[in-house]
Image: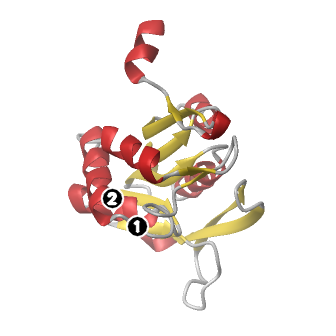
Amino acid sequence: MRLLEEKINTDGKVLSENVLKVDSFLNHQIDPQLMLEIGKEFARIFAGEGITKIVTIESSGIAPAVMAGLYMNVPVIFARKRKSLTLVDDLLTASVHSFTKNETNEISISKKYVNENDRVLIIDDFLANGEAALGLVDIVQKSRATVVGIGIVIEKSFQHGAQKLKDLGLRVESLARIASLSNGKVSFINENVEELIK
């Protein structure tokens, strides 16, 4: 997605060969117009899949997921990382390790919001090692719903998360695919070049 790549180039900050900071438009301050375009793109990519629910994880996945839900006209459920006094019964849970924060959280969703009749699209802001996405897949599968696909805003393709998910037979669609963060520069995977190489 050209618009997203341009935003990453102008406003993203490479902190190391593994860490890209995008807190000025995605995961601290949010660019609503960009999120609207991201939601529209996810709706286009997954059109015709009969999606009934979108599942994401708090907090950075919520904005793109809500915008996609708006275009698809389906509810959005977000997995909570912390226990709530009101979210205590009949929970579906999974354990997720965050590479960036170097912490493990138990994420949870109430069973009443996802069931075996649902066709679920999982959306998240980043895909690196795949832990968050795998945790969400685990929760959706525990509900007996069908995971239709996984929509990722930014994929760090030099890490193994996307391949892990594809090896499980899951459809992964990423709007921006980063080949490298070496030398303080963001390099994207050029889809056209990649197709020629195959």
Depth check: 12 or 156 in front?
Answer: 12
Residue type at mark 2: give it: Met
Task: Residue lying at the far top in this picture: please name it.
Answer: 197
Q: Can residue 58 be seen in the rendering of this structure?
A: yes
Q: Nearer the viewer, residue 16 or 172?
A: 16
**Extreme bottom residue here?**
85
| Above-or-below relation of 118 to 106 | above
Q: Residue at x 28, y 45 (%)?
A: 41
With 193 as the anchor, is 134 left or right in this view?
Answer: right
Q: Position of residue 4 (x, y in %)?
A: 37, 46
* Figure quadrant of residue 106: bottom right
Label located before the other in sequence (1 or 2):
1
Say above or below: 37 vs 175: below
Crowding at dot 1, Cα within 10 Å, few <14 / some 14-19 / many 20+, comes out as some
Q: Residue 73: in sight, yes or no?
A: no
Query: What is the x, y in percent for residue 155?
Result: 53, 41
Which mark is on residue 30?
Answer: 1
Q: Residue at x 30, y 54 (%)?
A: 39
Disc 1 to disc 2: CB gap under 8 Å: yes
- Place of residue 191 in the rendered image (x, y in percent of width and height, measured from the top left): 40, 23
